[in-house]
Amino acid sequence: MRAREITPLALDSYQRAARIILSNHLVTTSYPDRAALPLLRRWATELRDDLLELFGYRLEVTETTARLFTVSDRLNPSAPARTATERTFDRTRYSYLALCLAALGRAGNQITLSELADHVAADAAQVDGVELSTDRASDRDAFVDAVSWLGVRGAIALADGDANGWASNPEAGEALYDIDRSVVVALFRPPRALQHLHSIRGLLAAETSTASEEDGVPLDAKEIGRRVRRALVERPVVLAGELDEHELIALAQPKTAVEVELLTGLIAERRAEGIAMIDPTGRLSDVRFPSTGTIAQVALLLAGEISDRILDVDAPDLAKLPIPHESDEYLIEQLDAAIPEAGIFEDLADEEVPMLGPAPEPVDPPGPATYPLIDDDWLTDKIAELVDRFGRTFAAQWQADHKGLRTQSLGLLQRLRLTHVVPGGVLVLPVLARYRDVVVSVRERDPLIDFAVDNSAPDTASEFSGTTEEPEVENA
């Protein structure tokens, strides 16, 4: 591992570079900031070797881009593309994004927004279920969201005009973009040509691995170790109950987490239930928690209340259930149904996706771990209680929408792998115990200042804050 050869004084710089590429996958001269690419270029050789050895990831660094080609062990719908206002991309926006990339790849050095829209509309007309009509405001907004996503990453740069003006009135507004072809090419580089696939499974790790036996270590063991290390940096928490016997052995080996710590600067918090990689810098996480805002604060409060319920020895015992087995089969079937099966696609498709390496020996899976169940009625009552106690500090839209507040806060806890939603309630996962003993403080405005400014104004400046004695947990 090349990180062991780096001096202690330079190690922090190296770890910052590793966190940048692991959290962004694509780095350009402007994205995520102007200092990122020079830092990655400095450590390109060492990072290339370590990322391949530990995770099976391939790093390509040029003068204008750094691109990390990752390996997927499973389909992961929890990290979607998002708009500038943090809205999740829907199918329409994803379609426009793909068609924009195709159009930019055929364009020259510059293109206007209306020209790009015309290219996308023409291509969309050839795809069943996809349409871009510039007469519809909703289509224009979705198209501009896709274009903005490309702009943030440096694939295009605004040279003149305003995209929002075009979205409001395409007859009066216009925008001109410079195209960075190196970024356009780097953005979409699947491990296998999509036209050659009969199934989305061909993009998963088992079918794309190129590892070979080295140093007397069997291929199986090397790949299992990489799979576990990938889980450590891709998931907020790796629970022992969701791993098979071979993966548990790899997770139990101290060097597995130590190598990830050395590369990234994360700190492994090991418990009997699994491992959480804690990010003390807050720079590898896509979600900060605890954080500001009503949803994050209510989620923190709810975590504390749930912890108190679990630890309450006088309360009735809670039922314990395993996390339901989550199969990718349904999602795979949905994606496979969209693959064209006629013409050139059928001619190019492989007859069979080859399996690389020997098949693993069948093993008896360990018994499933079980977790306490908190039922929906308790959660509903607790949200109502929290609103009653602290509702005046919440954003106005949530003060009367108890159901929406409950859904959003539980969604955040699930995204952080603190709970898992099941029919009838949520399963409480072990890491949630980090947020027990939540301390709440509500800071009110000085009434003398209120009177001096405007005695009739509503109290909109009350501030709610929740803190915990435990360190912050973030999505490593």
Image (tube, grey):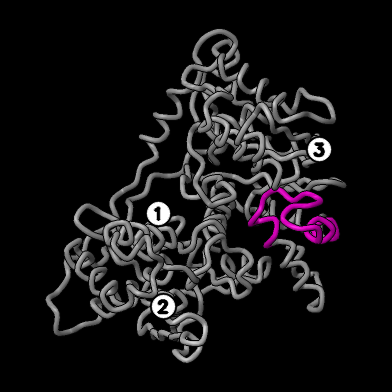
Nearer-N-terminus badge (1/3) = 3
Q: Which mark identifies residue 244?
A: 1
For label 2, the residue is 456
Between tags 1 and 2, which lies in front?
Answer: 2
Q: Which mark identifies residue 180?
A: 3
Between 112 and 219, the residue placed more toward the observer is 112
Q: CA distance from mark 2 to mark 3?
A: 54 Å
Nearer-N-terminus badge (2/3) = 3
**Which class describes the residues within 10 Å of circle 3: few (<14), some (14-19), or many (20+)?**
some
> Which picture quadrant has residue 262?
bottom right
Q: Which residues are magenta?
A: 19-42
Q: Is residue 383 magenta?
A: no
> Which picture quadrant has residue 362?
top left
> Which picture quadrant has residue 282?
bottom right
Position of the C terminus, as image quadrant, is bottom right
List the single residue furthest toward the top.
Answer: 343
Q: Secondary structure at mark 3?
A: loop
Q: Secondary structure at mark 2?
A: loop
